Image (cartoon, helix red, strand yellow):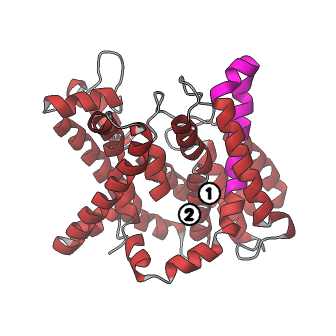
Amino acid sequence: MVLLVFVHGYNLNLRYLQPWTTPDEPLTVTTFIEYLFANGLFRFRIPMLFIISGYLYALHDQTPNKERLGKRVRTLLFPYLIWSALGIVLVYAFELFPYTRQLVIDSHVVQIDNERMQVHQYHWYETIARWLFFPVSYQLWFIRVLLFYNIAYPAIRWCVIHQQWSWVFFGFVTLLWLSTAGFIIAEGEGLLFFSLGVWIQKTDFSIESPARWLKPFPWMVIFVSFAMIKSVLAFKGVDWLGSSVYPIITLLHKLTVVSGLVACWFGLDKWVVWSMRHSWFVWLTSFSFIIYAIHAPLVAILIDGMFQWLNFVNGYRLITFALLPMFIILGSVVIGLVLRTVTPKFYSLLTGGRGV
């Protein structure tokens, strides 16, 4: 969740990141570092969450799927609807004041076209669509598609455990992933890795000890190398290779994600063990969901405001990239702590019962 906030705190000129994004500005220390981390080294995190989600869901097959889906209404659907509505209300409140209204407009987080750049300018049906399908709190897409994968789990499991069909199924979802295809209820990246998590749980694949070909050190070298090469090409590739650089950057992005998954899954065990031995870290983990829910669109809206406060300082963009996510993470923990202390039932509703 911490890495997620930093990815969304990316503040170069073109802020909407795709695997093939090439920043429309020179290569500098600031631009390279931000791109390297936000669109390179940190991009393994969502696929890893989908793998974990698929693995854990498949771990409880003794419980009927209908019963599990009933629980998902509380843990996924209710938080999705509540936080999506709160995101709209937050932006609407920001638009009531001239200074924060301009921050909303500059962030483009609620822009529909060149004329409508504020929630105040929405038609009623556009507000409903934002609430249900295209949240202002854009990180909620993960919950939306995860709920769909839980609903579709019996079909996914059938495709995974029947060997004669699993190759066809994984071939199809891999193509979806490579193409970065996405729909309202499903997209390639989540479907591939959720299904992979199911497959891992249904086979003898070891999640504790890496096979010989999955030793973390060489994968870590590949991971960092691909991320750095991709970052350089994002700034210089068009000059060197023309438009042919875009599929190369996209492929490097996918390879960075896969190598990062292997390297971090098997290579960070000692760090995890160290962290879980410290009570302060374990205590902080209970606020993971509230950090996830609160941080966006707040982080996107506040970027330009922080620029205005720090633009007299050399390296203000890199400073903003480092500090703004930390401020928002700290603020989210404080809000979560207050809500959990004062209104534990409401906090449980907001988080789907997490961290109570």
How many neighbours does mark 1 have within 10 angstroms: few (below 14), some (14-19), or many (20 or more)?
Answer: many
The residue labelled by disc 2 is 53
In the picture, the quarter occupied by the C terminus is: bottom left
Can you say whether 14 is above or below 32 in the image? above
Q: Is residue 340 left or right of residue 253?
A: left
Q: Residue 35, image x and y in percent? A: 56, 39
**Residue 244 within the magenta-colored segment of the rendering:** yes
Q: Secondary structure at mark 2?
A: helix
- Judge whether residue 245 is colored magenta: yes
User: What amino acid is at disc 1?
Assistant: Phe
- Residue 342: x and y in percent read 16, 72
Q: Is residue 130 left or right of residue 216?
A: left
For image coordinates 50% across by 49% down, the residue present is 145
Of helix, strand and loop, which mostly describes the magenta segment? helix
Decide: few, some or many residues near mark 2? Use Cα within 10 Å; few <14, some 14-19, many ≥20.
many
In this rendering, is residue 354 above or below 133?
below
| Camera-nearest residue between 210 and 278 | 278
Q: What residue did someone put label 1 on?
A: 194
Q: Is there CB contact under 8 Å for labels 2 and 1? A: yes
Residue 98 is marked as: none
Query: Which stretch is magenta?
Result: 235-260
